[in-house]
Image (tube, rainbow, N blue to C red):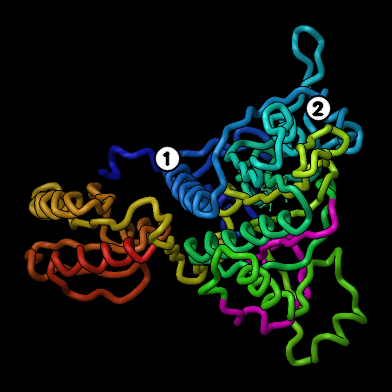
Amino acid sequence: MYISKSFIPILKNIPSEAKIKSHQLMLRVGMIKQSSAGIYSWLPLGLKVMKKIEQIVREEQNKIGAQEILMPTIQSSDIWKESGRYEDYGEEMLRIKDRQNREMLYGPTNEELVTDIFRASVKSYKSLPQLLYHIQWKFRDEIRPRFGIMRCREFYMKDAYSFDINDEEALFSYNKFFLSYLKTFKRLDLKAIPMAADTGPIGGNLSHEFIILAETGESKIFTDKRIFEVDSSGSKLEKKSLEDLRSKFEKFYSVTDEKFDKAEFETKVIEKNRLITKGIEVGHIFYFGDKYSKPMDGSVDLPGGKKDFVKMGSYGIGVSRLVGAIIEAKYDAKKEVMKWPISVAPYDISIIPMINKNDKSSLEKANKINLELEKNNIETLIDDTEENFSSKIKKMNLIGIPHQIIIGKQTENDSIEFKEAGEMSQKLKLSEIIKIIKKQKEEN
Ligand code: 5CA
Protein backbone atom coordinates (compact mmCIF):
# COMPACT_ATOMS: atom_id res chain seq x y z
CA MET A 1 0.00 0.00 0.00
CA TYR A 2 1.25 3.48 -0.89
CA ILE A 3 0.93 6.13 1.79
CA SER A 4 -0.26 8.60 -0.85
CA LYS A 5 -3.26 6.38 -1.61
CA SER A 6 -4.01 5.33 1.94
CA PHE A 7 -6.48 6.92 4.32
CA ILE A 8 -4.15 7.71 7.20
CA PRO A 9 -5.01 11.28 8.21
CA ILE A 10 -1.99 12.26 10.30
CA LEU A 11 -2.25 15.34 12.52
CA LYS A 12 0.71 17.69 12.99
CA ASN A 13 0.02 18.37 16.66
CA ILE A 14 -1.11 16.38 19.64
CA PRO A 15 -4.85 17.05 20.09
CA SER A 16 -5.34 18.96 23.34
CA GLU A 17 -8.40 16.99 24.46
CA ALA A 18 -6.36 13.78 24.70
CA LYS A 19 -4.83 13.24 28.12
CA ILE A 20 -3.14 9.85 27.82
CA LYS A 21 -0.65 8.60 25.26
CA SER A 22 -2.89 6.00 23.62
CA HIS A 23 -5.64 8.53 22.99
CA GLN A 24 -3.13 11.09 21.70
CA LEU A 25 -1.46 8.63 19.36
CA MET A 26 -4.69 7.15 18.03
CA LEU A 27 -5.98 10.59 17.07
CA ARG A 28 -2.61 11.74 15.79
CA VAL A 29 -2.09 8.91 13.33
CA GLY A 30 -5.75 8.78 12.36
CA MET A 31 -6.70 5.41 13.83
CA ILE A 32 -10.02 6.73 15.14
CA LYS A 33 -12.17 9.79 14.89
CA GLN A 34 -14.61 10.86 17.57
CA SER A 35 -18.15 11.11 16.27
CA SER A 36 -19.81 12.15 19.54
CA ALA A 37 -18.98 11.88 23.25
CA GLY A 38 -17.55 8.41 23.88
CA ILE A 39 -18.42 7.20 20.36
CA TYR A 40 -15.78 6.71 17.68
CA SER A 41 -15.38 5.82 14.03
CA TRP A 42 -12.56 3.39 13.35
CA LEU A 43 -10.39 4.44 10.40
CA PRO A 44 -8.34 1.95 8.34
CA LEU A 45 -5.23 1.86 10.53
CA GLY A 46 -7.17 1.49 13.79
CA LEU A 47 -9.57 -1.04 12.31
CA LYS A 48 -6.73 -3.18 10.94
CA VAL A 49 -5.18 -3.46 14.40
CA MET A 50 -8.51 -4.15 16.09
CA LYS A 51 -9.42 -6.86 13.56
CA LYS A 52 -6.10 -8.61 14.17
CA ILE A 53 -6.69 -8.52 17.93
CA GLU A 54 -10.19 -9.85 17.36
CA GLN A 55 -8.82 -12.77 15.34
CA ILE A 56 -6.34 -13.77 18.06
CA VAL A 57 -9.11 -13.59 20.66
CA ARG A 58 -11.30 -15.75 18.40
CA GLU A 59 -8.61 -18.38 17.81
CA GLU A 60 -7.96 -18.75 21.54
CA GLN A 61 -11.69 -19.09 22.26
CA ASN A 62 -11.98 -21.79 19.61
CA LYS A 63 -9.02 -23.65 21.10
CA ILE A 64 -10.88 -24.27 24.37
CA GLY A 65 -13.95 -25.52 22.51
CA ALA A 66 -16.03 -22.35 22.64
CA GLN A 67 -18.37 -21.87 19.66
CA GLU A 68 -18.92 -18.53 17.99
CA ILE A 69 -22.39 -17.06 17.58
CA LEU A 70 -23.55 -13.53 16.83
CA MET A 71 -26.28 -11.93 18.88
CA PRO A 72 -27.84 -8.59 17.95
CA THR A 73 -26.90 -5.27 19.51
CA ILE A 74 -30.56 -4.37 20.15
CA GLN A 75 -32.40 -6.45 22.73
CA SER A 76 -35.96 -6.60 24.03
CA SER A 77 -36.52 -5.41 27.59
CA ASP A 78 -38.68 -8.50 28.30
CA ILE A 79 -35.78 -10.83 29.07
CA TRP A 80 -34.18 -8.21 31.32
CA LYS A 81 -37.43 -7.92 33.22
CA GLU A 82 -37.39 -11.71 33.65
CA SER A 83 -33.91 -11.69 35.15
CA GLY A 84 -34.73 -8.69 37.30
CA ARG A 85 -31.91 -6.56 35.93
CA TYR A 86 -33.98 -4.11 33.86
CA GLU A 87 -34.43 -1.69 36.74
CA ASP A 88 -31.18 -2.56 38.55
CA TYR A 89 -28.91 -1.76 35.60
CA GLY A 90 -29.73 1.93 35.93
CA GLU A 91 -28.68 4.83 33.75
CA GLU A 92 -25.81 3.08 32.02
CA MET A 93 -28.38 1.23 29.90
CA LEU A 94 -29.46 2.99 26.72
CA ARG A 95 -33.21 2.46 26.51
CA ILE A 96 -35.07 2.85 23.23
CA LYS A 97 -38.72 2.58 22.15
CA ASP A 98 -39.64 1.19 18.73
CA ARG A 99 -42.60 2.39 16.61
CA GLN A 100 -44.94 -0.05 18.39
CA ASN A 101 -43.90 1.55 21.66
CA ARG A 102 -42.05 -1.60 22.70
CA GLU A 103 -39.21 -1.12 25.16
CA MET A 104 -35.90 -2.08 23.62
CA LEU A 105 -32.32 -1.49 24.67
CA TYR A 106 -28.83 -1.41 23.21
CA GLY A 107 -27.09 -4.36 24.86
CA PRO A 108 -24.50 -3.50 27.52
CA THR A 109 -23.84 -7.26 28.01
CA ASN A 110 -25.64 -10.48 27.02
CA GLU A 111 -26.31 -12.80 29.97
CA GLU A 112 -30.09 -12.63 29.43
CA LEU A 113 -30.07 -12.99 25.66
CA VAL A 114 -27.73 -15.96 25.67
CA THR A 115 -29.76 -17.66 28.42
CA ASP A 116 -32.84 -17.18 26.26
CA ILE A 117 -31.06 -18.83 23.31
CA PHE A 118 -29.84 -21.67 25.49
CA ARG A 119 -33.19 -22.46 27.16
CA ALA A 120 -35.00 -22.60 23.84
CA SER A 121 -33.01 -25.58 22.62
CA VAL A 122 -30.93 -27.33 25.26
CA LYS A 123 -32.99 -29.68 27.39
CA SER A 124 -30.65 -32.40 28.60
CA TYR A 125 -27.46 -32.62 30.63
CA LYS A 126 -26.09 -34.70 27.74
CA SER A 127 -25.61 -31.53 25.70
CA LEU A 128 -23.43 -29.92 28.38
CA PRO A 129 -21.07 -28.20 28.70
CA GLN A 130 -21.87 -25.44 26.23
CA LEU A 131 -19.42 -22.59 25.75
CA LEU A 132 -20.76 -19.86 23.48
CA TYR A 133 -19.18 -16.54 22.59
CA HIS A 134 -19.68 -13.61 20.32
CA ILE A 135 -17.73 -10.50 19.39
CA GLN A 136 -20.07 -7.58 19.15
CA TRP A 137 -20.51 -3.87 19.86
CA LYS A 138 -21.83 -2.93 23.29
CA PHE A 139 -23.22 0.32 24.59
CA ARG A 140 -22.91 1.65 28.13
CA ASP A 141 -23.93 5.19 28.84
CA GLU A 142 -20.83 5.81 30.98
CA ILE A 143 -21.20 8.84 33.21
CA ARG A 144 -17.66 10.00 32.33
CA PRO A 145 -16.44 8.57 29.04
CA ARG A 146 -12.73 9.37 28.79
CA PHE A 147 -9.32 8.38 27.54
CA GLY A 148 -10.60 7.78 24.01
CA ILE A 149 -11.55 4.20 23.35
CA MET A 150 -10.36 3.08 26.80
CA ARG A 151 -13.55 4.12 28.55
CA CYS A 152 -16.06 4.94 25.90
CA ARG A 153 -19.78 4.44 25.46
CA GLU A 154 -19.79 2.23 22.38
CA PHE A 155 -17.09 -0.44 22.48
CA TYR A 156 -16.25 -3.80 20.95
CA MET A 157 -16.26 -6.75 23.32
CA LYS A 158 -15.79 -10.48 23.18
CA ASP A 159 -18.23 -11.99 25.64
CA ALA A 160 -18.48 -15.69 26.29
CA TYR A 161 -20.93 -17.68 28.39
CA SER A 162 -20.64 -21.16 29.88
CA PHE A 163 -23.45 -23.57 30.80
CA ASP A 164 -22.76 -26.58 33.02
CA ILE A 165 -24.53 -29.25 34.98
CA ASN A 166 -23.02 -28.50 38.41
CA ASP A 167 -20.52 -26.32 40.27
CA GLU A 168 -17.58 -28.64 39.69
CA GLU A 169 -18.05 -28.70 35.92
CA ALA A 170 -18.77 -24.96 35.88
CA LEU A 171 -15.47 -24.24 37.60
CA PHE A 172 -13.74 -26.38 35.00
CA SER A 173 -15.25 -24.13 32.33
CA TYR A 174 -14.21 -21.03 34.31
CA ASN A 175 -10.66 -22.33 34.46
CA LYS A 176 -10.58 -23.04 30.72
CA PHE A 177 -11.30 -19.37 30.11
CA PHE A 178 -8.72 -18.43 32.74
CA LEU A 179 -6.07 -20.28 30.70
CA SER A 180 -7.32 -19.02 27.36
CA TYR A 181 -7.07 -15.42 28.63
CA LEU A 182 -3.46 -15.88 29.69
CA LYS A 183 -2.67 -17.28 26.24
CA THR A 184 -4.57 -14.54 24.41
CA PHE A 185 -2.79 -11.71 26.20
CA LYS A 186 0.57 -13.41 25.75
CA ARG A 187 0.04 -13.51 21.98
CA LEU A 188 -0.63 -9.78 22.17
CA ASP A 189 2.73 -9.44 23.92
CA LEU A 190 1.06 -8.19 27.10
CA LYS A 191 1.68 -9.29 30.66
CA ALA A 192 -1.87 -9.46 32.03
CA ILE A 193 -2.21 -10.57 35.63
CA PRO A 194 -5.39 -12.20 36.99
CA MET A 195 -6.59 -10.44 40.14
CA ALA A 196 -9.47 -11.22 42.46
CA ALA A 197 -12.17 -8.69 41.67
CA ASP A 198 -15.63 -7.49 42.53
CA THR A 199 -18.56 -8.67 40.41
CA GLY A 200 -20.62 -5.45 40.17
CA PRO A 201 -23.80 -5.55 38.07
CA ILE A 202 -22.93 -8.95 36.53
CA GLY A 203 -23.17 -10.71 39.92
CA GLY A 204 -21.80 -13.91 41.46
CA ASN A 205 -19.07 -14.50 44.00
CA LEU A 206 -16.03 -15.58 41.99
CA SER A 207 -14.36 -13.21 39.61
CA HIS A 208 -10.97 -12.26 38.19
CA GLU A 209 -9.94 -9.15 36.35
CA PHE A 210 -6.99 -9.43 33.97
CA ILE A 211 -4.90 -6.33 34.42
CA ILE A 212 -1.87 -4.92 32.67
CA LEU A 213 0.25 -2.44 34.57
CA ALA A 214 0.02 1.17 33.37
CA GLU A 215 0.35 4.51 35.15
CA THR A 216 -2.68 5.74 33.27
CA GLY A 217 -4.86 2.76 34.20
CA GLU A 218 -8.12 3.31 36.03
CA SER A 219 -7.90 0.23 38.26
CA LYS A 220 -5.99 0.52 41.52
CA ILE A 221 -4.28 -2.74 42.40
CA PHE A 222 -2.63 -4.22 45.47
CA THR A 223 -0.38 -7.09 44.71
CA ASP A 224 2.49 -9.33 45.68
CA LYS A 225 5.23 -8.61 43.13
CA ARG A 226 6.06 -12.28 42.81
CA ILE A 227 2.83 -12.88 40.88
CA PHE A 228 4.56 -11.38 37.82
CA GLU A 229 6.98 -14.30 37.80
CA VAL A 230 4.35 -17.06 37.70
CA ASP A 231 4.98 -19.37 34.78
CA SER A 232 1.74 -20.43 33.10
CA SER A 233 3.26 -22.47 30.30
CA GLY A 234 2.62 -26.18 30.07
CA SER A 235 -0.97 -26.11 31.38
CA LYS A 236 -3.36 -28.56 29.79
CA LEU A 237 -7.12 -28.45 29.27
CA GLU A 238 -7.65 -30.88 32.13
CA LYS A 239 -9.31 -30.26 35.48
CA LYS A 240 -6.30 -30.88 37.66
CA SER A 241 -3.83 -28.99 35.48
CA LEU A 242 -6.12 -25.95 35.35
CA GLU A 243 -6.77 -26.00 39.11
CA ASP A 244 -3.00 -26.05 39.63
CA LEU A 245 -2.60 -23.13 37.27
CA ARG A 246 -5.13 -21.03 39.16
CA SER A 247 -3.62 -21.85 42.52
CA LYS A 248 -0.17 -20.86 41.25
CA PHE A 249 -1.55 -17.34 40.82
CA GLU A 250 -3.88 -17.34 43.82
CA LYS A 251 -0.97 -18.15 46.13
CA PHE A 252 -0.01 -14.49 45.84
CA TYR A 253 -2.24 -11.75 47.24
CA SER A 254 -3.44 -9.74 44.30
CA VAL A 255 -6.66 -7.73 44.27
CA THR A 256 -8.33 -4.66 42.82
CA ASP A 257 -9.36 -1.87 45.18
CA GLU A 258 -12.95 -3.06 45.78
CA LYS A 259 -11.52 -6.25 47.28
CA PHE A 260 -8.67 -4.57 49.13
CA ASP A 261 -8.24 -5.23 52.82
CA LYS A 262 -5.28 -3.43 54.38
CA ALA A 263 -4.81 -5.82 57.29
CA GLU A 264 -4.95 -8.86 55.03
CA PHE A 265 -2.50 -7.30 52.56
CA GLU A 266 0.00 -6.47 55.28
CA THR A 267 -0.23 -9.90 56.89
CA LYS A 268 0.02 -11.88 53.66
CA VAL A 269 2.67 -9.85 51.84
CA ILE A 270 5.97 -8.85 53.41
CA GLU A 271 6.89 -5.24 52.85
CA LYS A 272 9.51 -5.74 50.16
CA ASN A 273 7.06 -7.70 47.99
CA ARG A 274 4.19 -5.20 48.20
CA LEU A 275 3.21 -3.35 45.08
CA ILE A 276 0.46 -0.75 45.01
CA THR A 277 -0.02 0.61 41.53
CA LYS A 278 -2.44 1.16 38.67
CA GLY A 279 -3.47 -0.96 35.75
CA ILE A 280 -5.81 -1.36 32.81
CA GLU A 281 -8.52 -4.01 32.96
CA VAL A 282 -8.42 -5.84 29.63
CA GLY A 283 -10.55 -8.82 30.61
CA HIS A 284 -12.97 -9.87 33.32
CA ILE A 285 -14.39 -13.31 34.12
CA PHE A 286 -17.30 -14.18 36.42
CA TYR A 287 -18.89 -17.23 37.96
CA PHE A 288 -22.48 -16.68 39.07
CA GLY A 289 -24.12 -20.13 39.18
CA ASP A 290 -27.88 -19.91 38.60
CA LYS A 291 -28.27 -16.13 38.95
CA TYR A 292 -29.81 -15.93 35.45
CA SER A 293 -30.84 -19.52 34.75
CA LYS A 294 -33.13 -19.65 37.82
CA PRO A 295 -35.35 -16.61 37.17
CA MET A 296 -35.30 -17.33 33.43
CA ASP A 297 -35.91 -21.06 33.81
CA GLY A 298 -32.79 -22.28 32.06
CA SER A 299 -32.90 -25.88 33.27
CA VAL A 300 -31.91 -29.31 31.94
CA ASP A 301 -32.91 -32.92 32.68
CA LEU A 302 -30.43 -34.63 35.00
CA PRO A 303 -29.39 -38.33 34.74
CA GLY A 304 -31.91 -39.48 37.43
CA GLY A 305 -34.87 -37.77 35.78
CA LYS A 306 -34.86 -34.64 37.95
CA LYS A 307 -34.34 -31.16 36.54
CA ASP A 308 -31.93 -28.46 37.64
CA PHE A 309 -30.95 -24.95 36.66
CA VAL A 310 -27.70 -24.76 34.73
CA LYS A 311 -24.67 -23.15 36.31
CA MET A 312 -23.32 -20.24 34.33
CA GLY A 313 -20.30 -18.00 34.02
CA SER A 314 -19.47 -15.09 31.72
CA TYR A 315 -16.15 -13.98 30.32
CA GLY A 316 -15.36 -10.63 28.72
CA ILE A 317 -12.43 -9.18 26.81
CA GLY A 318 -12.33 -5.51 25.83
CA VAL A 319 -11.30 -5.97 22.19
CA SER A 320 -11.42 -2.25 21.33
CA ARG A 321 -9.90 -1.27 24.68
CA LEU A 322 -6.97 -3.57 23.93
CA VAL A 323 -5.90 -1.36 21.02
CA GLY A 324 -5.35 1.48 23.50
CA ALA A 325 -3.92 -0.82 26.17
CA ILE A 326 -1.24 -2.10 23.78
CA ILE A 327 -0.26 1.49 22.97
CA GLU A 328 -0.04 2.33 26.68
CA ALA A 329 2.27 -0.66 27.09
CA LYS A 330 4.41 -0.21 23.98
CA TYR A 331 4.56 3.46 23.03
CA ASP A 332 7.73 5.27 24.05
CA ALA A 333 6.53 8.85 24.43
CA LYS A 334 10.05 10.23 24.97
CA LYS A 335 11.41 8.82 21.72
CA GLU A 336 8.01 9.19 20.00
CA VAL A 337 8.24 5.60 18.82
CA MET A 338 5.41 3.09 18.73
CA LYS A 339 6.14 -0.53 17.94
CA TRP A 340 3.13 -2.80 17.50
CA PRO A 341 3.67 -6.47 18.33
CA ILE A 342 4.00 -8.24 14.97
CA SER A 343 0.85 -10.24 15.77
CA VAL A 344 -1.37 -7.15 15.50
CA ALA A 345 0.73 -4.63 13.56
CA PRO A 346 -1.26 -2.85 10.82
CA TYR A 347 1.59 -3.66 8.39
CA ASP A 348 4.62 -5.88 8.93
CA ILE A 349 7.17 -3.52 7.44
CA SER A 350 7.41 -0.02 6.05
CA ILE A 351 9.51 0.88 3.04
CA ILE A 352 10.95 4.37 3.06
CA PRO A 353 12.54 5.39 -0.24
CA MET A 354 14.33 8.74 -0.61
CA ILE A 355 12.44 10.36 -3.44
CA ASN A 356 12.84 13.68 -5.18
CA LYS A 357 11.21 15.16 -8.25
CA ASN A 358 14.06 14.26 -10.59
CA ASP A 359 14.99 10.88 -9.28
CA LYS A 360 12.40 8.18 -8.77
CA SER A 361 14.90 5.30 -8.90
CA SER A 362 14.55 4.47 -5.21
CA LEU A 363 10.77 4.24 -5.59
CA GLU A 364 11.32 1.70 -8.36
CA LYS A 365 13.59 -0.29 -6.06
CA ALA A 366 10.94 -0.06 -3.34
CA ASN A 367 8.35 -1.48 -5.73
CA LYS A 368 10.58 -4.43 -6.58
CA ILE A 369 11.29 -5.18 -2.93
CA ASN A 370 7.59 -4.86 -2.19
CA LEU A 371 6.74 -7.49 -4.81
CA GLU A 372 9.16 -9.92 -3.21
CA LEU A 373 7.76 -9.23 0.28
CA GLU A 374 4.17 -9.65 -0.92
CA LYS A 375 5.05 -13.04 -2.41
CA ASN A 376 6.00 -14.03 1.12
CA ASN A 377 2.77 -12.70 2.62
CA ILE A 378 4.53 -9.77 4.24
CA GLU A 379 2.34 -6.66 4.31
CA THR A 380 4.04 -3.38 3.51
CA LEU A 381 3.34 0.32 3.63
CA ILE A 382 5.44 2.33 1.18
CA ASP A 383 6.04 6.01 1.80
CA ASP A 384 5.92 7.26 -1.79
CA THR A 385 5.70 10.94 -0.83
CA GLU A 386 8.42 13.51 -1.50
CA GLU A 387 8.73 14.55 2.13
CA ASN A 388 12.18 14.76 3.65
CA PHE A 389 13.81 11.74 5.22
CA SER A 390 13.45 12.74 8.86
CA SER A 391 9.75 13.50 8.62
CA LYS A 392 9.19 10.19 6.83
CA ILE A 393 10.94 8.31 9.63
CA LYS A 394 9.08 10.29 12.28
CA LYS A 395 5.75 9.45 10.67
CA MET A 396 6.54 5.73 10.42
CA ASN A 397 7.73 5.71 14.04
CA LEU A 398 4.33 7.04 15.10
CA ILE A 399 2.35 4.61 12.95
CA GLY A 400 4.26 1.87 14.74
CA ILE A 401 5.00 -0.62 11.98
CA PRO A 402 7.59 -2.82 13.69
CA HIS A 403 10.18 -2.98 10.85
CA GLN A 404 11.54 -0.46 8.38
CA ILE A 405 13.51 -0.64 5.14
CA ILE A 406 15.28 2.52 4.03
CA ILE A 407 16.14 2.90 0.37
CA GLY A 408 18.63 5.38 -1.04
CA LYS A 409 20.52 5.70 -4.31
CA GLN A 410 23.16 3.18 -3.25
CA THR A 411 20.77 0.46 -2.12
CA GLU A 412 21.44 -2.94 -3.71
CA ASN A 413 19.38 -6.07 -3.19
CA ASP A 414 22.13 -7.77 -1.23
CA SER A 415 22.66 -4.82 1.13
CA ILE A 416 19.45 -3.20 2.31
CA GLU A 417 19.20 -0.85 5.25
CA PHE A 418 16.84 -2.55 7.67
CA LYS A 419 15.81 -1.59 11.16
CA GLU A 420 13.39 -2.31 13.95
CA ALA A 421 11.33 0.83 14.66
CA GLY A 422 13.33 3.10 16.96
CA GLU A 423 16.54 0.99 16.84
CA MET A 424 19.84 1.24 14.93
CA SER A 425 19.84 0.03 11.35
CA GLN A 426 21.84 -2.82 9.83
CA LYS A 427 22.60 -3.89 6.25
CA LEU A 428 21.00 -7.17 5.26
CA LYS A 429 20.08 -9.15 2.17
CA LEU A 430 16.41 -9.09 1.24
CA SER A 431 16.22 -12.84 1.77
CA GLU A 432 17.51 -12.38 5.34
CA ILE A 433 14.94 -9.69 6.06
CA ILE A 434 12.18 -11.96 4.79
CA LYS A 435 13.45 -14.76 7.00
CA ILE A 436 13.46 -12.57 10.13
CA ILE A 437 9.91 -11.35 9.59
CA LYS A 438 8.51 -14.72 8.63
CA LYS A 439 10.03 -16.28 11.73
CA GLN A 440 8.52 -13.60 13.99
CA LYS A 441 5.12 -14.09 12.37
CA GLU A 442 5.27 -17.86 12.71
CA GLU A 443 6.12 -17.65 16.40
CA ASN A 444 2.74 -16.07 16.94
N1 5CA B 1 -20.74 -9.85 30.84
C1 5CA B 1 -19.47 -9.65 31.45
C2 5CA B 1 -18.46 -10.60 30.91
S1 5CA B 1 -18.77 -11.05 29.31
C3 5CA B 1 -19.03 -8.21 31.27
O1 5CA B 1 -19.71 -7.43 30.65
N2 5CA B 1 -17.88 -7.87 31.85
S2 5CA B 1 -17.26 -6.41 31.94
O2 5CA B 1 -18.24 -5.46 32.30
O3 5CA B 1 -16.15 -6.50 32.85
O4 5CA B 1 -16.71 -6.02 30.53
C4 5CA B 1 -15.74 -6.83 29.88
C5 5CA B 1 -14.58 -6.02 29.36
O5 5CA B 1 -15.05 -5.02 28.46
C6 5CA B 1 -13.81 -5.26 30.43
O6 5CA B 1 -12.84 -6.07 31.06
C7 5CA B 1 -13.17 -4.14 29.62
O7 5CA B 1 -11.95 -4.58 29.05
C8 5CA B 1 -14.19 -3.88 28.52
N3 5CA B 1 -15.00 -2.68 28.83
C9 5CA B 1 -15.96 -2.55 29.77
N4 5CA B 1 -16.48 -1.30 29.77
C10 5CA B 1 -15.82 -0.62 28.78
C11 5CA B 1 -15.90 0.73 28.28
N5 5CA B 1 -16.77 1.60 28.77
N6 5CA B 1 -15.08 1.08 27.27
C12 5CA B 1 -14.21 0.20 26.73
N7 5CA B 1 -14.10 -1.08 27.16
C13 5CA B 1 -14.89 -1.48 28.18
Label 1 crowd bin: few (<14), some (14–19), many (20+), radius 10 Å: some
Q: Which residues are magenta?
A: 204-231
Rendered location of residue 386, percent (x, y) = 23, 49
Rendered location of residue 30, percent (x, y) = 47, 44
Q: Is residue 7 left or right of residue 205?
A: left
Residue visible at 70% across and 37% down in the picture: 124
Residue visible at 67% across and 84% down in the picture: 226
Residue visible at 32% across and 62% down in the picture: 442
Rendered location of residue 426, percent (x, y) = 22, 76
Query: Which element type, helix, strand or loop, lies under badge 1?
Result: helix
Q: Is residue 408 visible?
A: yes
Residue position marked by numbered label 1 in the rendering: 44
Number of numbered labels in the structure image: 2
Q: Is residue 430 left or right of residue 85?
A: left
Rendered location of residue 394, percent (x, y) = 37, 61
Q: Is residue 355 visible?
A: no
Looking at the figure, which quarter contains the N terminus?
Answer: top left
Q: Of circles 2 and 1, which is in front?
A: 2
Label 2 crowd bin: few (<14), some (14–19), many (20+), radius 10 Å: some
Q: Amino acid at mark 2?
A: Ile
Residue visible at 76% across and 22% down in the picture: 76
Residue 79 circle label: 2
Task: Return the residue nearer the eye: 395 or 59.
Answer: 59
Q: Is residue 198 left or right of residue 345?
A: right
Residue 376, magenta (yes or no): no
Please say if 86 is above or below 128.
above
Measure how far apart labels 2 and 1 are at the Cα level. Answer: 37 Å
Residue 209, magenta (yes or no): yes
